[in-house]
Image (cartoon, grey):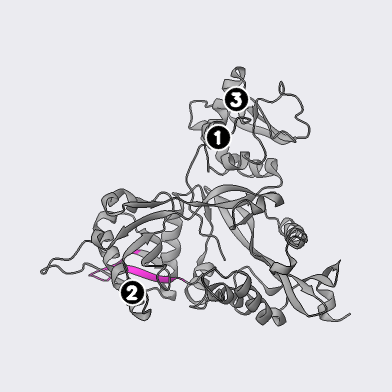
Amino acid sequence: MNKKNKSILEDLGDGLTLRRASVDDTEALVKFNGEVHQDPDEDFAENIAEWVRDLMTKPHPTFKPEDFTIVENTQTGKIVSCLNLIDQTWAYEDIEFGVGRVELVGTHPDYRRRGLIRKQMGVVHQWSAERGHKVQVITGIPWYYRQFGYEMGLNLGGGQIGYVVHIPKLQDDEEEVYQFHPAKKKDLALITRLYKQGARRSLISSARGEDIWAYELSGRSRESGYWSEFRIIENLKGKPVGVLAHNRDMRGTVMRLHWYELAEGISWLDVTPSVLRYLQTIGEAYAQEKEDKEFQGFFLGLGEEHPVYEVIPDRLPRVIPPYAWYVRVVDIPDFIEHIRPLLEERIARSPIVGHTGELWLSFYTEGIKMIFESGKLKSVERWEKPDTEEEAMIAFPNLTFLQLLFGYRSFDELRNSYADCYYEGKYQDAAAVLRVLFPKKSSNVWGLG
């Protein structure tokens, strides 16, 4: 059996084969993804194509070429569908867990509605389980991935926009007090430390060590949609006070900043005017490279919440609400057991300190039972047949519990949105416990791509 045959996962019939990719598939995957992911106003998605090329040809901290699945027309030898799985580690507060990120999902228009994505999803979900991932995630189009067991349950992106008029100008006798230098290998420890500091504001975050930051600094192609320009912010004495990252060019007419963090003890109010002027300078330079572009403003794409929003609210007149990550958790009891220390800590710091009791949650087709004793979670298990309303203390339709689990929505927000997310009055105590265990808290996850 040759090497290519060994990569075959399944004969799908009609001349189609499902297999794992190899480095030999690089150019075909680059071409296919550039074409299938192009926006309506472009002929080829260059940024997506170069992301694929990087994944296939450059050393990546967690990905290898065979983490792509391919559906191939064996008669023409052409790719008609593909997707991949990118391993990573995320954290729930400080508790890390394995994540399988599914991305670059695409099918040629002539081969859609044949179940090709469903077949490939089944494969990468199995890979993810075998690798010990507790969660799978994906960024993607509305609704589509719900049919594979995903729920939109975690903030994705979002931010606030200001315009040229909102950028403070230096007076004639003023000197810029902060400088911006390209980040280098020697800055990896600083970058890692500041990232961990900022991640503490987020309920869910992506765990990133120096190996991942080294890849971000020098492992990607500039043409890739995931490439970032990193800058170390220094005062006039040359002391680093912060870090930022922005895109390689403008999105439309605004310059996008997607990471901005300052060291402890440094004022956001003092540094931010310099950051805005830097964005204007770099934005105008990028605009000169494109004859049809003009710098008109800046987008602080720092998620739904960030300290900088609090210090310059009048300079940010436009709010861009976040989209959402799709999340998939096959074994909810296992995930809850994994974050048990945090849940017990929440109880200990709450008005229900020392709680003893049971919590029976119905998801209609199944559910979970949680038993607490003196503030400790003694057990959590799957409830196979929650078939009576009398047994269920609280009910959640479909996969909406995942929104609560990941802090995306509060229990009361879900109740207001879904008539069948409810509890009987006699279970008010159970509802109080649930609010303590799973409070709403914003997240801004920088997933590894």
Kindly identify the residue that appears in the image at 54 percent across and 60 percent down. Answer: 447
Circle 2/circle 1 CB separation < 8 Å: no
SS for tag 2?
strand
Could you classify mark 2 by the number of other residues whose Cα lies within 10 Å: few (under 14), some (14-19), or many (20 or more)? few
Can residue 241 be seen in the rendering of this structure?
Answer: no
Residue 142 located left or right of residue 76: left
Whether residue 230 appears in magenta in the rendering, the answer is yes
Residue labelled with disc 1 = 417
Q: Position of residue 363 (x, y in %)?
A: 69, 35
Magenta stretch? 228-242
| Residue type, mark 2 in image | His
Q: Position of residue 201 (x, y in %)?
A: 44, 49
Farthest residue, direction left: 173
Based on the displayed image, in which of its 4 quarters is residue 118 positioned? bottom right
Residue 59 located left or right of residue 76: left
Could you classify mark 3 by the number of other residues whose Cα lies within 10 Å: few (under 14), some (14-19), or many (20 or more)? some
Based on the displayed image, in which of its 4 quarters is residue 55 positioned? bottom right
Q: Is residue 56 above or below residue 275?
A: below
Whether residue 343 appears in magenta in the rendering, the answer is no
| Residue type, mark 3 in image | Ala
Could you classify mark 1 by the number of other residues whose Cα lies within 10 Å: few (under 14), some (14-19), or many (20 or more)? few
Residue labelled with disc 2 = 181
SS for tag 1?
helix
| Residue type, mark 1 in image | Ser
Residue 133 located left or right of residue 438: right
Which of the image's four quarters has the C terminus?
bottom right
Kindly identify the residue that appears in the image at 73 percent across and 55 percent down. Answer: 129
Can residue 65 be seen in the rendering of this structure?
Answer: yes
